Amino acid sequence: MKPRDPDALIARAGVRGNPDRDQHFLVDDRVLDRLPTYLTDIDADTSHVLEIGGGTGALTDRLLAAAGDGGTGADRDEGDRSVDGGVTVVERDPDLAAFLREEFAEQIDAGRLTVIEGDALEVALPEFSASVSNLPYGVSSEITFRLLPEQRPLVLMFQREFAERMVAEPGTSEYGRLSVSTQHYADVELVETVPRQAFSPQPAVQSAVIRAVPAEPDYEVDDEDFFFRFVKALFTQRRKTIRNGIRNTAHISGLSDPEAVVEATDEAVLRKRPDAMSPAAFAELTQLALTVDSPDGSN
Ligand SMILES: C[S@@+](CC[C@H](N)C(=O)[O-])C[C@H]1O[C@@H](n2cnc3c(N)ncnc32)[C@H](O)[C@@H]1O
């Protein structure tokens, strides 16, 4: 079946995207058509696709075409938000959620689509096998770190600069805390950049699509919370050496005896700056810190 026309959907919804509510609707058919293929290209399980921020449903429509056949949903317990096969879309704007329910009434009745009206940061998310979303940029980071620990393939649209920081390698100016925390959960690649003209209304900056495939890191950390806190702390002192970073940021990392950690660490590591440290090098430093200190987790 021919996909729904994005401009016609916007006209039928009778809305204009409101940038203050992170509403930039995709209107470029080629981009819309490509997004699900970033999942199917890797043979990802598309039986239960989660979309955050449905808008007027142009992407929802493509995801329904790509997602599993689904059951009737009739035997679902009340309050059970799982989908038997199909798409779940979360949309915060009540008018858009109402439009999605009307526009896709047939698919909802067939148990292939569930519309959850609410804030993606607060609602209970259903079980999902993969997510494809053109994220609300104002909360893209928070949403991403809700999705990444679920260990499912993700195809997500971000502001380009943010996407570049997610995939950045050590030794580059984009590499930072966001790169380490993203790559802790997944192998990530930037699969396409998207011009402003692909959206209505146009955002101020370019966008980019990331594909994240869940992967175990090639290192171990015994205390993940401390690992993330330590990395965050050290990157607040991006231009300082690791030696000074450890000393200056105990109020963030929670280290009670930073000097003991400095003493136990190799001189070659202490001389580095955070952007030269691979995720595995941060993990090694974390493990060392945990053996000589008992970081306070209250920060
Ligand atoms: C960038 S638009 C994408 C819309 C549509 N998927 C498309 O590609 O055209 C983001 C959508 O997320 C919705 N939104 C904004 N903040 C949200 C939140 N916290 N939770 C759920 N949806 C949100 C907006 O109303 C908007 O419809």
Image: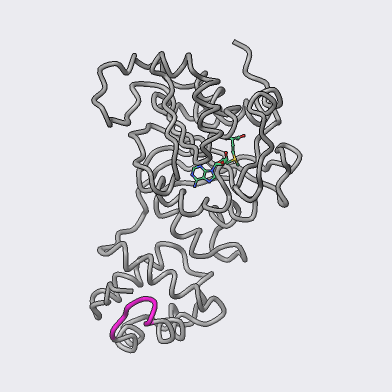
Could you say where residue 174 lies in the image, as x and y percent from the top left? 60, 62
In magenta, the rendered stretch is 250-256
Q: Nearer the viewer, residue 46 or 120?
A: 120
Residue at 27% in and 64% down: 223
Question: Which quadrant holds residue 293?
Answer: bottom left
Q: Is residue 149 left or right of residue 4?
A: left
Q: Nearer the viewer, residue 95 or 167?
A: 95
From this view, report whether residue 101 is shown above or below residue 227: above
Toward the top, the furthest residue is 1
Residue at 66% in and 48% down: 19
Magenta segment includes 253 = yes
Could you say where residue 80 lies in the image, as x and y percent from the top left? 28, 30
Quadrant of the snapshot with the N terminus? top right
From this view, report whether residue 272 is shown above or below residue 78: below
Residue at 49% in and 37% down: 91
Residue at 32% in and 83% down: 261
Q: Nearer the viewer, residue 54 or 256?
A: 54
Could you say where residue 54 lies in the image, as x and y percent from the top left? 53, 34
Question: Which quadrant holds residue 252?
Answer: bottom left
Q: Is residue 164 left or right of residue 182?
A: right
From this view, report whether residue 97 is shown above or below residue 142: above
Quadrant of the snapshot with the C terminus? bottom left
Could you say where residue 277 lies in the image, as x and y percent from the top left? 47, 69
Magenta segment includes 188 = no
